[in-house]
Amino acid sequence: MTHPYKSVPVRPSEITPKEVYLSRRDFIKAAGVIAGSVALAACAPEAAENTEAAAPAPDRPSFTDELGDMANTFEEITGYNNYYEFSTNKEAVKPLAENFNPSPWTVEVTGMVAKPKTFGIEDLLSIFTQEERIYRLRCVEAWSMVIPWNGFPLASLLKQVEPTSDAQYVRFETVYRPEEMKGQGSAFYPWPYQEGLRLDEAMNDLAILATGLYGEMMPNQNGAPIRLVVPWKYGFKSIKAIVKIELTDQRPNTLWNTVAPNEYGFYSNVNPNVDHPRWSQASERRIGELTRRETLMFNGYAEQVAHLYDGMNLSLHY
């Protein structure tokens, strides 16, 4: 079916097997073209002592999306974060997240599944083939980045637990540790952070569970040790620091939809034709650029996901 949306197919070069991107990273280091001297200070203490994790960040020109746009720098991606569990100040999240401990870690997968299971982070890293996905991230606040994530398809994990025929939705929940995540002390938000997808959205190949970026372990401020990435939706749908995944036949509550349902819909697909009540969504500011650029329907991934919403009025189901 032909859709009226501007879309760019995901090239094979955007989905890179682990051994390839690790080889590329090694080549970059060997060639001495690493930019800056930023270390992964926000990684777990164990990781910070590891030579790989402590190495300088890769250089941006080595990574582009399928539009040819360069990935944002490691410093930009790890230094500007929307992560209310720590702070509403994007530039304050990184230092506040330094003492967060992402190890040990487990993810419980329950609900309407034939084989409920609890995975250790080590299991998730070893059972599932890690890939590199270079995706655009479009924040609902109208800024964007290009990020080279590492991770694996969410569908691969769901297939392992075998959803029953009654399962229609997938509910995600963030860890609740107000002693480490000071933002969770705010009584304004119904912690822990919760998000949800329809099962068919969750099974789409673009939806991944990310375990790192730029070939390194996931920094604390970006959602360590594991987070969801759904690149055709606004960034707040990509819940961080996941500890629970539940299959259900009921549409789950989500934090932002609960707090302000008139501003943040359950679907929250990137849509330049439906403005936020307080600002336009027609354009965006790419972090690191001075001018604004046109926002693409479904963030440019319409070819892969528009069929999921056939027959829906996207101005009502925002």
Image (cartoon, grey):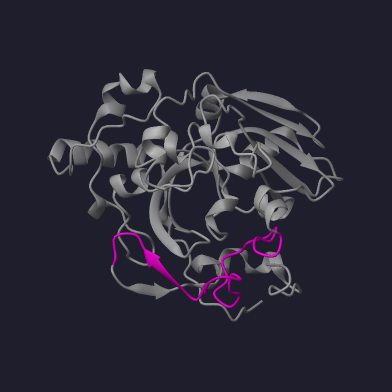
* Residue at the farthest left position: 32
Relative image position of residue 32 (x, y in whole percent)? 12, 39
Residue 217 visible in the picture: no
State which quadrant residue 191 falls in.
top right
Q: Quadrant of the N terminus?
A: bottom right
9 vs 267, nearest the viewer: 267
Does residue 168 appear to the left or right of 239 in the view shown? right
Q: Please, what is the dominant secondary structure of the magenta stretch?
A: loop
Q: Is residue 217 above or below residue 21?
A: above
What x and y, as percent, mark residue 240?
A: 54, 40
Residue 69 located left or right of residue 166: left
Q: Which residues are magenta?
A: 261-289
Q: Residue furthest bottom?
A: 4
Q: For residue 178: magenta?
A: no
Viewer-side residue, 100 vs 152: 100
Q: Position of residue 258 (x, y in %)?
A: 72, 52
Q: Give percent across and percent down for residue 45.
A: 37, 19
Give the residue at x 26% y 32%.
39
Task: Decide: is 316 above or below 11.
Answer: below
